[in-house]
Amino acid sequence: MSNSDFEKKRSETSERLGIEASKFPKHIAIIMDGNGRWATSRGLPRFQGHRKGARATEKIVDYCNKIGLECLTIYSFSMQNWKRPKTEIAFLMQLYTHYLVGIRKTLLESNVRLVHLGRTEKLPTRLVKELHKTIEITSKCTGMVLGLALNYGGREEIIDAMKKISDEYKKGTITADQIDEELVNENLYTAGLPDPDLLIRTSSEKRISNFLLWQLSYAEFYITDTLWPDFSPEEVDKAILEFTKRSRRLGDIKPSLV
């Protein structure tokens, strides 16, 4: 997809929402929280919440692509989530495997490219196989990039990047003076992707939970009480509207305050 295609989608969405197209976010990251609470509040087992949450994810991915978002990153499973009950983890791994197979046709038809953020170690063999297959199948897609943070940890990502840089330094391919912000960016899981402009977290929690610690440096946060299974395209619109009202100074100060 060309820049003009993204711009056309953003322009149409901006006009519908009554906002300036220039303020439209390019990259939204979402901490999808509340599946378990959604199920518990309805007297259902937790796995029902995860299943409903997966359907919400498909809906949001499709919507974000339609409105002209260049990149959407979703936090599916953190490295800390391995502490959950084994039965729940087994269900989630199976759910992710089926999801990766099921979304291929939709991603291809929608021209969405999948990338993985995280480590594949500890993940089931079949899940890793289907993950790599979906990434390969969508690798030529030129539309929105869908970042799947699966078995992901922000601190671990930075450690992995430092190890790569350290290896290059030991080989003599880089010098200490060449180690800068750009080099770190090139060695993160998100290499080649823009930093998120907007972070959305559902279920009213006010923490980032070891998510994109480097990349969220200047992101705007939007917290909603809505639990992830109930999260809708209308909620995305609300977050974008709120985002456009923010004054993004990126470390600078407003001229009026000088």
Image (cartoon, rainbow, N blue to C red):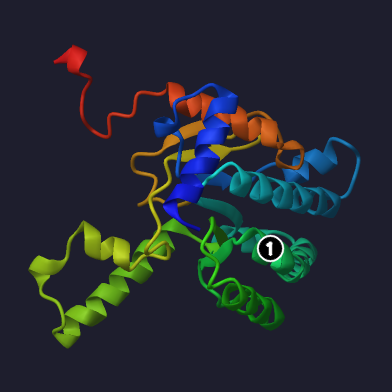
The extreme top residue here reads 256
Q: Residue 207 in the image: x percent, y percent?
A: 50, 38
Q: Residue at x 58, y 73 (%)?
A: 135
Placement of 121 over or under 17, stated as above or below: below
Which sits in the foreground, 174 or 67? 67
Side of 236 relative to 188 (left or right) = right
Q: Residue at x 72, y 62 (%)?
A: 106
Q: Residue 29 in the image: x percent, y percent?
A: 51, 46
Categorize mark 1 by other alpha carbons within 10 Å: few (<14), some (14-19), many (20+): few
Location of the C terminus by quadrant is: top left
Side of 152 relative to 220 (left or right) = right
Q: Secondary structure at mark 1?
A: helix
Side of 163 relative to 201 (left or right) = left
Placement of 100 over or under 78, stated as above or below: below
Placement of 78 over or under 45, stated as above or below: below
Q: Residue at x 51, y 38 (%)?
A: 10
The extreme right residue here reads 43
Which sits in the foreground, 222 or 68? 68
Determine which quarter of the picture holds residue 183: bottom left
Q: Residue 190 in the image: x percent, y percent?
A: 42, 61
Say which residue label 1 marks.
Answer: 109
Placement of 169 over or under 247, stated as above or below: below
- Residue 206 shows in this picture: no
- Residue 65 shows in this picture: yes
Q: The disc labelled 1 sits on which kind of residue?
A: Glu
Q: Residue 30 in the image: x percent, y percent?
A: 56, 45
Determine which quarter of the picture holds residue 90: bottom right
